[in-house]
Amino acid sequence: MRSIIDILDLSTTELSELIATAQDIIAHPETYSEACKGKKLATLFFEPSTRTRLSFEAAMYELGGNVLSVTGAGTSSAAKGESVADTAKTVSCYADIIAMRHPKEGAALVAANNASIPVINAGDGGHCHPTQTLADLLTIYREKGSFDNLTVGLCGDLKFGRTVHSLINALSRYHNIRFVLISPEELKLPSYVKNETLKKYGLPYVQSTDLEEYLPQLDILYMTRVQRERFFNEEDYLRLKDCYILTPDKLKKAKSDLCVMHPLPRVNEISVAIDNDPRACYFKQVLNGKYMRMALILKLLKEAQA
Ligand code: CP
């Protein structure tokens, strides 16, 4: 049974096919309105979410399917100590596909190994968030027309930022990509991402603590939130939380066709004064996420039936 735990579970050909399906859904939504009639998506969210859960659910409804939902660890039998494995086996009796978010790295893989239906990782701790990357890729494609020849700045919490890890893995497979990794010392990209992706494939990258120095060079700026929920120590969080704030004044130094992205939720990282700037793409990502999740649900259900 095919599940998607990591963005690397999808080949570049499959990513192109998902983007093509999403674009067809955007152009002809009526063609897809009954594509999942009679099918059920279970959304199992053991960690807070607005975009990912609601976009998965909107995606399934727009495909003509139905949704079963667990929101919050306290509302399911996980609160009584039920394992992820038993939860996955149980939900397989009721639904056709699962989207799961969990605070523990590896939880989605455990679910996939025990479910008899496809499992989509909707975020596992600080590890991966592959469907956010699908949203990011469609946004970059619609803005830039290609994934090649881009200088991509990633700024903020690169240590715990699962969306950053998944996006680096995805973009590393395209041509002439250069990364600028901007973070405080304490929140630098983990060595395993550097060693297993950037160094392994010989991808050019620089590490810096200075956003303004590199801003003029960037084609994409991917801002991220310093995540309070990943810190053990409140003092460290308070010291680091506002380390990068993108303002209209700073944006004056950027390219006129820069694409400013953020997986959201935003706290202070991007001034709301930037929201109406044509370079602001973060709410486009939100909408593109629904279309890519529609394309992925269609693909996995079709493969499961074959
Ligand atoms: N980008 C993202 O995962 O948002 P939510 O946490 O609201 O789902």
Image: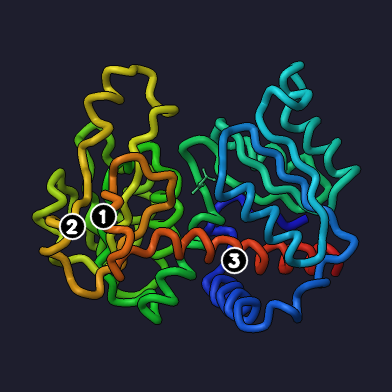
Q: Nearer the viewer, residue 269 or 156?
A: 269
Count of marks placed on residues: 3
What residue do we see at 60% from left, 47% from top? 122
Do labels 2 and 3 touch, CB within 8 Å?
no
Q: What element carries label 3?
A: helix
Q: Residue 210, position in %: x, y?
A: 12, 47
Mark 2 is surrounded, within 10 Å at the Cα level, by few (under 14), some (14 to 19) or many (20 or more) other residues, namely: some
- Kindly identify which residue carries mark 2: 248
* Picture quadrant where residue 220 is located: bottom left
**Tag on residue 273?**
1
What residue do we see at 51% from left, 62% from top? 135
- Looking at marks 2 and 3 on the same chain, the residue that comes earlier in the sequence is marked by 2
- Looking at marks 3 and 1 on the same chain, the residue that comes earlier in the sequence is marked by 1
Q: Where's the N terminus, which quadrant?
A: bottom right
Q: Nearer the viewer, residue 251 or 170?
A: 251
Q: Is residue 231 left or right of residue 208?
A: right
Q: Is residue 90 positioned above or below 37 on the image?
A: above
* Picture quadrant where residue 254 is located: bottom left
Distance CA(mark 2)–CA(mark 3): 30 Å
Amino acid type for the residue under numbered disc 1: Ala
* Picture quadrant where residue 203 is located: bottom left
Q: Is residue 108 positioned above or below 197 on the image?
A: above
**Tag on residue 59?**
none
What residue do we see at 78% from left, 23% from top? 77
Q: Residue 120, position in %: x, y?
A: 66, 51
Q: State how the image is colored.
A: rainbow
The label nearer to you, 2 versus 3, is: 2
- Kindly identify which residue carries mark 3: 292
Amino acid type for the residue under numbered disc 2: Pro
Amino acid type for the residue under numbered disc 3: Met
Q: Is residue 192 left or right of residue 57?
A: left
